[in-house]
Image (cartoon, rainbow, N blue to C red):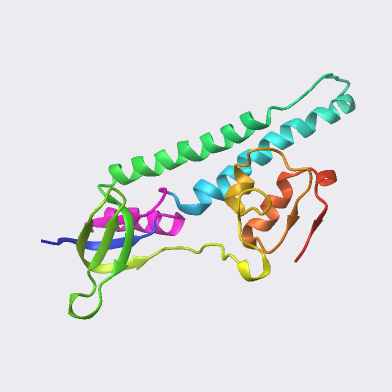
Amino acid sequence: MAQEFDLVVIGSGPGGYVAAIRASQLGQKVAIVERENLGGICLNWGCIPTKALLKSGEKFESLSHLKDYGLSASGASFDFDAIIQRSRGVAKQLNQGVGFLMKKNKIEVIEGSAKLEKGAAAPNVVVALKAGGSRTIEAKSVMLAVGARARALPQIGLEADGDKIWAYRDALAPKKLPQDLRGHRLGRHRHRVRQLLPRPRRRGDSR
């Protein structure tokens, strides 16, 4: 038998989880469906980890200006893997924070991919559970907060492989620091990715 909710939110990015919290605060019985990580792309693979990487870069860059203040620090170096790990750690901590907010506001988190049933069953939501199997949910209202995703362009050779061709996730957790990088239509993440690499290492940026 399907479980009934006043509101089912599909997608747990900034739009989805904030709406779910507010609906719960107003007395609604709420469930949120997420197929990957609570917090969505912004928190896990966009704004937050990018800012963490940039902060490490800013700290290192500031060392080259110490002499302007009558200070010196010779032999400064950086640990690329540690910088990436810190960035991922910041994202993980905030992801866990969203999970805490879900529990605090009595919002049921359902891990899996959701789709809406058609016909007389609407607006039932069917979830293919991440753990296996499926679950049907009756919803008085459904909010779609699924965001967007990058589109691969294999017809012109632009399909991310994590090696020669990166998607934004590859850029935020690279295995090694690239010698040069050419950006092509990375969407709203393009400018963030461009900021992460020192200018001498970036050969060009196409539009």
Residue for point 22% across, 75% down: 122
Horizontal side of residue 10 vs 199, given as left or right:
left
Is the residue 163 above or below the residue 2 in the image?
above
Horizontal side of residue 71 vs 54, given as left or right:
right
User: Is 100 in the magenta?
Assistant: no
Q: Which quarter of the figure has residue 69?
A: top right
Q: Quadrant of the C terminus?
A: bottom right
Is the residue 5 above or below the residue 84 in the image?
below
Residue for point 25% across, 56% down: 30
Residue for point 80% across, 28% down: 63
* Whole-percent x, y for residue 104 in the image: 29, 42
How many marks are shown on the rendered structure?
Answer: 0
Q: Is residue 27 visible?
A: no
Q: Determine the residue located farthest toward the bottom in the rendered image.
A: 119
* Whole-percent x, y for residue 51 in the image: 62, 43
Q: Is residue 106 visible?
A: yes
Of residues 19 and 46, which is closer to you in this image?
46
Q: Quadrant of the N terminus?
A: bottom left
Q: Which quarter of the figure has residue 143?
A: bottom left
Is the residue 89 above or below the residue 22 in the image?
above
Residue stretch in magenta: 12-38
Horizontal side of residue 180 vs 35, given as left or right:
right
Residue for point 44% across, 55% down: 13
* Whole-percent x, y for residue 181 in the image: 75, 51
User: Is 34 in the magenta?
Assistant: yes
Q: Determine the residue located farthest toward the left in the rendered image.
A: 1
* Whole-percent x, y for residue 204 in the image: 81, 56
Horizontal side of residue 63 vs 159, given as left or right:
right
